[in-house]
Image (cartoon, rainbow, N blue to C red):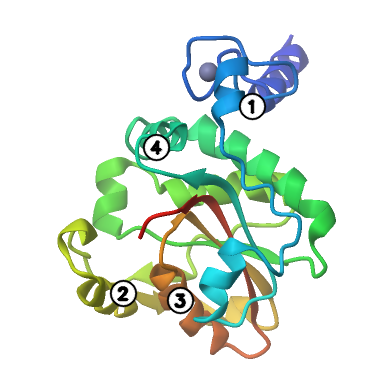
Amino acid sequence: MVIKKYIKGLVGLFFPDLCLACRKEHPIDGSLFCVRCEVEMPYCNFEDLRSNEAFMRIAGRLPIKHASSHVYFKTDNIVQQILHALKYEGKEEIGLSMGRFHAAQMKPMLMDYPDIIVPVPLHPKKKHLRGYNQSEIYARGLAMGLNIPVYPNILKRKKFTESQTKMNKTERLRNVSEGFELKNPGQINNKHILLVDDVLTSGATLEACGLPLLKIPGVSLSVATLALADNW
Ligand SMILES: [Zn+2]
């Protein structure tokens, strides 16, 4: 009985009862989404983790080995609903399941396998309000698929960043570039770190996280995000 429940739990995580996007229809076998949502889902399907849109957006800011995003985010597309559910409705299973799928897709293309995953942190106040960090949830999904550990306490956000939507680009850059500090840097010596965020926009947040990590001896970086925003 216990085993049966356990197996159902595992299968449920990978293949949910209801489509993770509309949460109305049953998903197609082997997918997280129903037929309609699967057709609409704008997968990035990058075939090379060293030259793609996500890689190009970050490479000018940070030296990275690989970059991968799972789906394209546009205003009003299906991904916006998914992100909303993951961020504000406590739908952690979306992040876990999509992270596992993304990992499975990425795995055969990794020329250099990461050792650990570090999620972009929320400010503790925000995490307390929301109850969880959606990027850490996605990181946990990726970690299950890649079979490597998540280190959620390496980066810490220094100050409460004002809602970025009200700022212009320069203010936004300054705001995040002052935002992160390292905790327990001794734990990441010589590690290849997969830095994970929910959405890749300009890459400024990932840069602000990556720069202090790269100061640690022997550290190298790759990046994975759930979504790649086309408008930033
Ligand atoms: Zn659906």
N-terminal of the pair, mark 3 or mark 1, is 1
Q: Quadrant of residue 31?
A: top right
Residue 135 image position (x, y, % from top left): 47, 51
Q: Is residue 156 left or right of residue 46?
A: left
Q: Mark 3, residues whose alpha carbon is within 10 Å: few (<14), some, or many (≥20)? A: many
**Residue tagged by mark 1?**
13
Front residue of 53/174: it is 53
N-terminal of the pair, mark 4 or mark 2, is 4
Q: Is residue 39 left or right of residue 148?
A: left
Query: In the rendered image, which quarter contains the C terminus?
Result: bottom left
Q: CA distance from mark 4 to mark 2?
A: 25 Å
**Residue tagged by mark 3?**
207
Q: CA distance from mark 3 to mark 1?
A: 32 Å
Residue 37 image position (x, y, % from top left): 55, 23
Front residue of 113/69: it is 69
Q: CA distance from mark 4 to mark 3?
A: 24 Å
Q: Mark 1, residues whose alpha carbon is within 10 Å: few (<14), some, or many (≥20)? A: some
Residue 157 image position (x, y, % from top left): 33, 68
- Amino acid type at image mark 2: Gly
Q: Is residue 211 left or right of residue 90?
A: right
Answer yes or no: do the residues labelled 4 and 3 have beta carbons within 8 Å? no
**Residue tagged by mark 4?**
80
Q: CA distance from mark 3 to mark 2?
A: 11 Å
N-terminal of the pair, mark 3 or mark 2, is 2
Front residue of 227/222: it is 227
**Residue tagged by mark 2?**
179
